[in-house]
Amino acid sequence: IDKSAISHWKLTELAKKIPELTPVVTSAQSVIASYTPSPSGMIVSQLASSLTVNLGKKITPAKVNKALHDLELQDWAKPGVNRERKLTEKGKLYGIALLTTSESGWQGAQLRWHDSVIPLLTEYLTEKHK
C-alpha cells in the first residue's frame, strides 16, 4: 500500500478524533493527492493481452502469474490460505500494490504492473515456449 494512501487514512482518522482539524486535514489531503500519481499499471489480464499481441500467441493470465512467481516478482501473501499475492522486494521495482475492495466486500491488495515488466515477461515466455 503506498504511503499517500496511508497518510490519507491517518489524516481522516485524526479529523474524526479532533473535528476542529477537518479543514486543515482536507487541505493536507488535497496537497497529497495533487502530488500523488494516479494509480497506473496493468493487472495480470491486461499484461496477458499485451503479451499475446507482442508474442503472436495466446498468453493466459495464469501463465503470466506463473511467470511473475518464477521471476520472483510476486509471492503468496498467505501461502495455502487464499489466492492473494504480494510484491516481492524485486517486484516493487516493476509494480505497485493498491488496496481494493470488491463488490462482494473482499478487501486486499491488487497488484498493478508497470510497462517495464513487459520485456522481462517477454523474455521469460519466449525462453519457456521455444
Image (cartoon, rainbow, N blue to C red):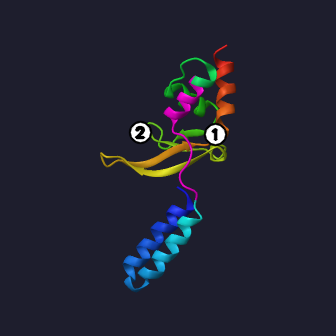
Mark 2 vs mark 1, CA separation in Å = 27 Å
Give the number of marks.
2
Residue named by callout 1:
115
Asked if disc 2 and disc 1 are in contact, CB closer than 8 Å, the reply is no
Query: Per the image, is 59 magenta?
Result: no
Q: Which residues are magenta?
A: 37-52
In the displayed structure, 85 sits above or below 2; it is above
Q: Amino acid at mark 1?
A: Asp
Mark 1 Cα within 10 Å, few/some/many (few <14, many 20+)? some
Q: Amino acid at mark 2?
A: Asn
**Where residue 37 appears, x then y in whole percent?**
58, 57
- Reading the chain from its start, which is encountered first: label 2 or label 1? 2
Mark 2 Cα within 10 Å, few/some/many (few <14, many 20+)? few
Q: Residue at x 52, y 75 (%)?
A: 28
Q: Secondary structure at mark 1?
A: helix
**Which quarter of the image is occupied by the C terminus?**
top right
In the rendered image, which quarter is residue 13 located in?
Answer: bottom left
In the displayed structure, 109 sits above or below 59; it is below
Q: Residue at x 58, y 39 (%)?
A: 74
Question: As rendered, which of 96 and 46 lies closer to the eye?
Answer: 46
Q: Nearer the viewer, mark 2 or mark 1?
A: 1
**Where residue 109 appears, x then y in whole percent?**
47, 48
The numbered dot on residue 105 is: none
**Where residue 73 appears, x then y in whole percent?**
62, 39
Q: Residue at x 56, y 62 (%)?
A: 3
Residue found at the far top of this picture: 130
Residue named by callout 2:
82
**Where residue 10 appears, x then y in whole percent?**
47, 70
Q: Residue at x 59, y 65 (%)?
A: 35
Q: Secondary structure at mark 2?
A: loop
